[in-house]
Image: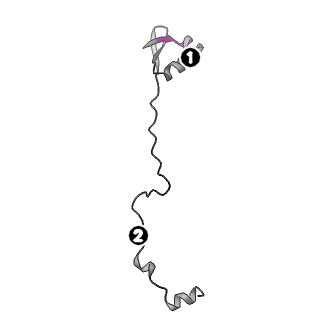
Amino acid sequence: MTTITTHEAKTHLSRYLADVELGKEFIIARGKTAVAMLVPMKKPKQKARPKVGDIKGKPFEFPLSAFAPLTEDELKEWGL
């Protein structure tokens, strides 16, 4: 791990960030005292998105009464 001063960090931040993206780590020091670390961030795990048509959770089941024929009164209410 490389130690750099705060002045170097401010002056060459873009360069150091490019190195960090490649996996390198830096200690940033004020004088001879280490005050911070510049390290790569862990990439968050992305949740897999469901594909169109995938069923999430328990599938809905229609009750058998949903397929029963309509009564005469129900047909009249619908104007049929």
Q: Earlier in the sequence, mark 1 or mark 2?
A: 1
Q: Secondary structure at mark 2?
A: loop
Q: Main secondary structure of the magenta part?
A: strand
Indicate which disc residue 15 carries: 1
Q: Quadrant of the N terminus?
A: top left
Q: Residue at x 45, y 36 (%)?
A: 44
Indicate which disc residue 72 carries: none
Circles 1, 2 touching at the beta carbon (< 8 Å): no
* Percent of width and height locating residue 11: 59, 13
Q: Residue at x 48, y 58 (%)?
A: 53
- Magenta part of the protein: which range? 3-7
Above or below, 64 relative to 46? below
> What residue would you read off at disc 2?
61
* Percent of width and height locating residue 61: 41, 69
> As rendered, which of 31 and 78 lies closer to the eye?
78
Q: Quadrant of the C terminus?
A: bottom right
* Percent of width and height locating residue 2: 45, 12
Above or below, 72 relative to 5? below
Above or below, 43 relative to 77? above
